Amino acid sequence: MPPFSWKNKVVLGVNAHPDDLHFGAGATLAKAAREGAVVYCAVLTNGNKGNAGNRKLGSKELVKIREKEQLHAAKVLGVTKVFFFGYPDCELAPTMAAKQKLVRLIRRLKPDVVIGLDPSRYYSPSHNLVHHADHRAAGEITLDATYPLCRDRLCFPNAGPPHRVPYLFLVTFDDANYFENISRTLATKIRTLACHKSQIADMQNMPQFVKQWAITCGRKSRRYRLAESFRFIQL
């Protein structure tokens, strides 16, 4: 597949938690903004339970901190606006109510591209990690809202005029069919992740970890030195 053109696109990234897409697609979002796309982000949960070890923080404090971190990171990436849905962390479910909220946003913004999390795996055998339940739920909400719910006029008729999303990118480590060249925006991704101080315990080694991840994706692409990996679906 040839490189995707981000020029003049409207892009909506859908996160479960404030930092999710910054890890999985931060350099791609930065590249899209740099190439002339209008980039928006939706954050489905308020992130009120996850932190990097500060035991003094309560949930209410953490919500405020993570929202500030997300807004700071969005400025670094070039994101136009962030939308906070406010569902409790670790309690996200792919309900029709959650899907309707995202459908309403999609119909309002009319994105050409939706970037979300792959809901198809409970764990990654190649990376030896478990996919957070909120990630799977967010992926399912994103997938269903994008197709068919936002397209069909009889689905949520009070949520605005129907909109067809042409392109869907799902962040994945195991089933990628598209790799984005991030050689020019990896540094932006690292600066973006540095905004999430409440989530990264080892900030000193984070840049090297992120770079090595990009190198691994680049090798899988057989094309680029540094990459991010996706399941690309043209709807």
Image (spheres, rainbow, N blue to C red):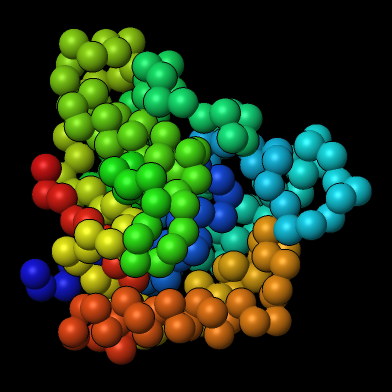
Classify residue 233 as left or right of residue 180.
left
Query: Residue 193 lies in what quarter of the image?
Result: bottom right
User: In x, y percent, where is residue 126?
Assistant: 34, 66
Residue at 63% x, 30% y: name it.
88
Residue nearer the viewer, 10 or 132: 132
Residue furthest to the bottom in view is: 225
Residue nearer the viewer, 190 or 161: 190
Residue at 30% x, 89% y: name it.
225
Residue nearer the viewer, 165 or 126: 126
Observer able to see residue 104: no
Give the position of the C terminus as an image quadrant: top left
Residue furthest to the right in view is: 56
Residue at 28% x, 36% y: name it.
143
User: In x, y percent, where is residue 194?
Assistant: 65, 70
Observer able to see residue 223: yes
- 81 versus 208 height, above or below: above
User: In x, y percent, where is residue 201?
Assistant: 72, 67
Residue at 18% x, 84% y: name it.
222
Residue nearer the viewer, 127 or 136: 127
